[in-house]
Image (cartoon, rainbow, N blue to C red):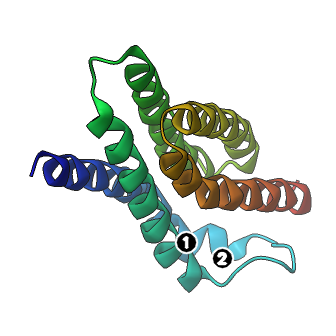
Amino acid sequence: MRYIYKLIISVVVCQGAGIIGSIFTAPAIADWYITLQKPFFTPPNWLFAPAWITLFLLMGIAASIIWHIGLEERPVRVALVLFIGQLILNALWSFAFFGMESPLLGMIVIVALWVAILATIVRFFRISSLAGWLMIPYIGWVTFAGILNVAIYMLNS
């Protein structure tokens, strides 16, 4: 039963980060983002919400696996601090790119986010390979988002 509570809390926290990000994203999609020039490989807008919901679910499961091992273990605490840090950077990217309407600021934040995700994945793999693997789609998507962010910046500068 303890694991189920940790799983629920972890998933809710991750989805909460997504909701915070969407507060900045949703209004900008209809007015600012639509006016930007975008590269040919830009996915349709409808794809972003299900992709992020799925990624936040996987991230929450990964975090719950690490947390379940026990906070008395220093590697677990370090891994979860990194995880929380990258989650904050994730929401900060939405604020920078959409809220501030700044692809340049978005690029800066997404680089820091990517590094934080990689550090989290490395720590997670040291504790649980399953938790590490659950984070791989996330870094893949953020890599793609970073490339998209750079392309949007270049096309609109």
Q: Name the image quarter holding residue 24.
A: bottom left
Q: Residue 1 location, x and y as percent?
A: 9, 52
- The residue closer to the viewer here, 24 or 53, is 53
Mark 1 neighbour class, 10 Å CA radius: few under 14, some 14 to 19, many 20 or more: few
Position above or below: 79 against 19: above
Looking at the rendered structure, the secondary structure element under dot 1 is helix
Which residue in the structure is indicated by mark 2? Answer: 34
Asked if residue 74 lies left or right of residue 42, the reply is left
Q: Amino acid at mark 2?
A: Ile
Residue 77: name its quadrant.
top left
Question: In the image, is 51 to the left or to the right of 70?
Answer: right
Q: Nearer the viewer, residue 31 or 84?
A: 84
Tally of numbered tags: 2
Query: Which label number is shown at residue 29?
Result: 1
- Residue drawn at (63%, 34%), measured in percent from left and top? 122
User: In the rendered image of this protein, does residue 30 appear above or below residue 148?
Assistant: below
